[in-house]
């Protein structure tokens, strides 16, 4: 490919959260290879700089990528991040990828359960704060990484933080259901704007995801790691939703292996999606 070749994402700006490793880094590398200017959102400075270097190398003919540092467990930092990202000339794709599972129940500085905050409240708030630039950049896309784990969720809107009933995988599953419900409601609210919202299950992938999980989860991932998919495989559907003309104008979907699939019955509830949105707006202080 020559330096004058026009690639599919030439001229596009893509923001990727959780971009320092795993699916986020693989996605960033793929997007840069397609010509996009990638903005990597990372928590750890050293790992962020390393990922930035790898993305720059992969996209040697793309605009120089940039790094934004933010701890998404802090809603104050999410707001500060959004303020900086709103200074970009455009955002064509926002990829909400950052996620974790926490072994023991922890509260953030804002007083919310950690998994709920990073996996749901942070992308909920960030996306809403970036809607002005996303609308101005339309047609644009919001892609949120969920999981098949949403099917085992037991979401109680009266106890989102699982106070008195915390289990690590229940917290994770609930947050992934929240991702699907958020996508559903966001798509509804953005109807007619040319800003689409879709989510996906990336597959069972060998990444750093379980590092903060319970011992049984870390051991299971270590033992079974050889049978898990690569980060590049996990990024495939993310990149598809971010770039493919096949999904232009398609919104509100849940995708697996680049195909639209039906999520759980609970995930299809418009009432639950609307109520979760209202509660999330209240918790994050969103106007």
Image: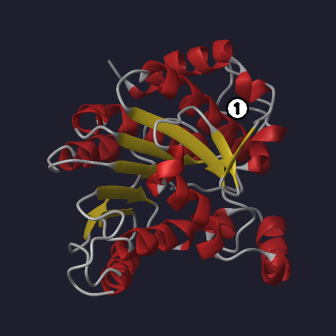
- Which percent across, then down, holds residue 18? 46, 61
Residues 130 and 240: in front is: 240
Vertical position of residue 127 compared to residue 56: above or below: above
The quadrant in which residue 178 appears is top right
Name the spot of residue 116 as percent of width and height, x first: 59, 40
Q: Which residue is mark 1?
A: 163
Q: How is the image coloured?
A: secondary structure
Residue at x-position 49% and y-position 55%: 244
Q: Nearer the viewer, residue 69 or 65?
A: 65
Q: Is residue 209 left or right of residue 32?
A: right
Q: In this image, 79 relative to 109: left or right?
A: left
Q: Please rate how many residues cluster around mark 1, counting C-alpha atoms within 10 Å: few if below 14, some from 14 to 19, many from 20.
A: few
- Give above or below for 97 relative to 171: below
Q: Position of residue 91 (x, y in %)?
A: 27, 48
Quarter of the image that includes the C terminus = top left
Q: How many marks?
A: 1
Q: Check the image and report above or below for 125 versus 98.
A: above
Q: In terms of secondary structure, where does tag 1 sit? A: loop
Q: Quadrant of the N terminus?
A: bottom left
Q: Position of residue 37 (x, y in %)?
A: 27, 65
Q: Is residue 144 left or right of residue 133?
A: right
Q: Where, by quadrant of the figure, is residue 48 drawn?
A: bottom left
Location of residue 236 by image quarter = bottom right
């Amino acid at each position: 490919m020559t330096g004058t070749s026009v690639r599919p994402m030439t001229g596009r700006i893509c923001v990727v959260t959780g971009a320092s490793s795993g699916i986020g880094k693989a996605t960033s590398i793929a997007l840069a290879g397609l010509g996009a200017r990638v903005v990597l959102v990372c928590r750890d400075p050293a790992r962020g700089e390393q990922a930035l270097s790898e993305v720059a190398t992969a996209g040697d003919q793309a605009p120089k990528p940039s790094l934004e540092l933010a701890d998404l467990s802090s809603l104050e930092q999410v707001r500060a991040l959004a303020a900086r990202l709103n200074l970009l000339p455009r955002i064509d794709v926002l990829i909400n990828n950052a996620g974790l599972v926490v072994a023991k129940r922890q509260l953030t500085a804002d007083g919310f359960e950690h998994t709920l905050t990073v996996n749901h409240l942070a992308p909920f708030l960030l996306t809403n704060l970036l809607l002005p630039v996303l609308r101005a950049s339309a047609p644009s896309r919001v892609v949120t990484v969920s999981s098949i784990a949403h099917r085992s969720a037991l979401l109680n809107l009266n106890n989102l933080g699982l106070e008195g009933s915390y289990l690590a995988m229940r917290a994770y599953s609930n947050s992934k259901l929240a991702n699907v419900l958020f996508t559903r409601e966001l798509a509804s609210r953005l109807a007619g704007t040319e800003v689409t919202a879709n989510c996906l299950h990336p597959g069972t992938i060998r990444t750093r995801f379980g590092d903060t999980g319970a011992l049984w989860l870390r051991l299971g991932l270590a033992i079974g790691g050889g049978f898990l998919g690569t980060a590049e495989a996990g990024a495939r559907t993310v990149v598809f939703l971010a770039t493919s003309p096949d999904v232009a104008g398609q919104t509100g979907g849940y995708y697996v292996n680049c195909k639209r699939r039906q999520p759980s019955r609970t995930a299809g509830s418009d009432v639950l999606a609307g109520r979760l949105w209202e509660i999330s707006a209240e918790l994050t202080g969103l106007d």
